[in-house]
């Protein structure tokens, strides 16, 4: 997307590629500045709609009102006379991408896609297999379970696996120096988080800046934190301050509010200045065009139990799909097969610990494509390139230059623990500029 390039990643990519490529980004149809779909008259209208409901239902009596409200978005978004709303499938975007390839005069495409961009790249590879020069996808969705509406089978456990690593690394760092991860406390990071979460589930906390911190909001913010290891120390501090505030420590609530506000402001910085930020609307337009979620309330309520059994993060992911219950599938969507043999090998990059696009998704995509190579990163977070990991960067750049593939079975070692001071540097921060926001979950209402 253009916001990714404009936020600094374009310069980073140009530097890494030594100026040998023109870096071209585009907003997929209906997204950003590309004939954007708009489901509400104003930002204020959308904010009011979302603030009237939890981020996801976490008590039984919240489920039906949530379903009724979010299930009405299909009629709202499609009833505004916007032709683009019915033509936002990834297959449509893949066709647009091939027209862009032709427009810049390339016989075959050189493509680098992250998160949803991995699904677009995979779709392009299967629809236009003879037009691939180099196609690298990172933060890879399993295209089959995404298309058939079973992404929850991954999401119900993927975020929790990253959170376990977060807690483990926090405790390990605190064992060296308690100041390295305040959240560890006397009983460990997992216990601190569980206690805070259970407390605010029963009694929400009104922070000094006016934010009402509820169970659903903290779960959603935690999901966002799991995307970005470079933010883990800050996220952990926020939980630690909140735990102290709940324990009655003077001044801790102010520290918690300031820390959480800093995190949210960083996530929203890339979209500052837009009169109407349509990320929420566009995400629904694409998701509902592509995926099978046309089901009644009883289906969503029943599967909530399975999502919750996976982890506390499962319901967050599951209920995000409700707007598709009454939103027609696009007749132009591509639903497979995912087994094309491309004219050049596809490079598939997967993290061992990824909160939304788990390692199994990368494994599946690499297995099904007849001409692909899997490059693994033994670390954490959403997407691996170019998270200041020299191994990943070198392999991806060499591949884009001349098609060179890493040896089969290559696993790049994880970066040092994000909680250790030595893992932070000015160059590291520069390398993640812009990309840190790629594919983040929808913003959290009321924060």
Image: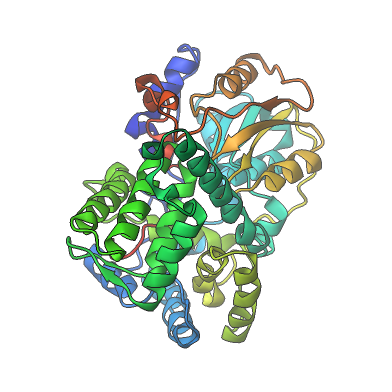
Q: Position of residue 116 (x, y in %)?
A: 55, 47
- Left or right, residue 174 beside residue 210: right
Task: Say how the picture is coloured.
Answer: rainbow
Is 160 situated above or below 101?
A: below
Q: Quadrant of residue 151?
A: bottom right
Percent position of residue 14, x then y: 43, 19
| Residue 150 falls in image quadrant | bottom right
Could one spot residue 254 in this view of the protein? yes
Task: Give me the residue at 68% from left, 51% from top.
Answer: 143
255 vs 125, nearest the viewer: 255
Q: Quadrant of the C terminus?
A: bottom left
Residue at 31%, 74% (x, y): give it: 49
In the orientation shown, which residue stands out farthest toward the front?
186
Name the one closer to the observer, 181 or 32.
Answer: 181
Residue 12's spot in the image, x, y percent?
Answer: 41, 22
Residue plotted at (36% across, 38% down): 179
Q: Indicate whether 422 appears above or below 141.
A: above
237 above or below 283? above
Above/below status of 156 relative to 122: below
Res. 2 in view = no
Is residue 393 toward the left or the right of residue 151 in the image? left
The quarter holding residue 200 reads bottom left
Q: How many marks?
A: 0
Percent coordinates x, y for residue 235 in the rendering? 38, 47
Q: Quadrant of the N terminus?
A: top left
């Amino acid at each position: 997307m253009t916001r990714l390039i404009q936020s600094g990643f374009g310069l980073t990519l140009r530097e890494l590629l030594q100026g040998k490529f023109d870096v071209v980004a585009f907003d997929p149809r209906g997204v950003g500045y590309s004939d954007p779909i708009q489901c509400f008259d104003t930002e204020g209208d959308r904010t009011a709609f979302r603030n009237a409901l939890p981020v996801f239902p976490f008590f039984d009596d919240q489920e039906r009102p949530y379903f009724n409200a979010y299930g009405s978005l299909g009629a709202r978004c499609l009833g505004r006379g916007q032709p683009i709303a019915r033509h936002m499938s990834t297959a449509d975007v893949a066709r647009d991408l091939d027209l862009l390839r032709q427009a810049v005069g390339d016989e075959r495409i050189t493509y680098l896609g992250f998160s949803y961009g991995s699904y677009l790249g995979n779709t392009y590879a299967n629809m236009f297999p003879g037009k691939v020069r180099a196609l690298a996808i990172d933060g890879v969705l399993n295209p089959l379970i995404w298309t058939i509406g079973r992404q929850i089978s991954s999401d119900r456990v993927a975020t929790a696996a990253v959170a376990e690593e977060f807690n483990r690394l926090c405790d390990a760092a605190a064992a060296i120096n308690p100041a390295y991860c305040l959240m560890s406390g006397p009983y460990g990071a997992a216990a601190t988080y569980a206690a805070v979460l259970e407390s605010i589930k029963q009694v929400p906390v009104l922070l000094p800046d006016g934010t009402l911190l509820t169970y659903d909001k903290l779960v959603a913010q935690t999901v966002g934190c799991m995307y970005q290891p470079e933010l883990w120390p800050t996220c952990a501090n926020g939980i630690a301050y909140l735990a102290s505030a709940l324990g009655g420590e003077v001044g801790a609530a102010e520290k918690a509010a300031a820390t959480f506000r800093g995190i949210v402001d960083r996530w929203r910085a890339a979209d500052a200045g837009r009169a109407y930020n349509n990320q929420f609307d566009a995400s629904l337009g694409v998701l509902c065009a592509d995926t099978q979620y046309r089901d009644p309330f009883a289906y969503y309520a029943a599967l909530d139990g399975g999502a919750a059994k996976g982890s506390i993060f499962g319901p967050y992911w599951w209920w995000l799909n409700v707007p598709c219950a009454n939103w027609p599938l696009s007749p132009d969507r591509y639903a497979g097969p995912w087994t094309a043999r491309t004219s050049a090998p596809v490079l598939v990059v997967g993290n061992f610990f990824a909160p939304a696009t788990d390692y199994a998704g990368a494994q599946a995509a690499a297995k099904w494509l007849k001409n692909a190579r899997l490059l693994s990163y033994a670390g954490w977070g959403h997407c691996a390139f170019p998270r200041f990991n020299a191994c990943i960067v070198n392999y991806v750049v060499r591949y884009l230059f001349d098609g060179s593939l890493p040896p089969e079975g290559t696993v790049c070692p994880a970066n040092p623990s994000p909680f250790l001071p030595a893992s932070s540097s000015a160059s590291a921060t520069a390398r993640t500029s812009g990309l840190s926001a790629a594919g983040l979950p929808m913003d959290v209402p009321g924060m």
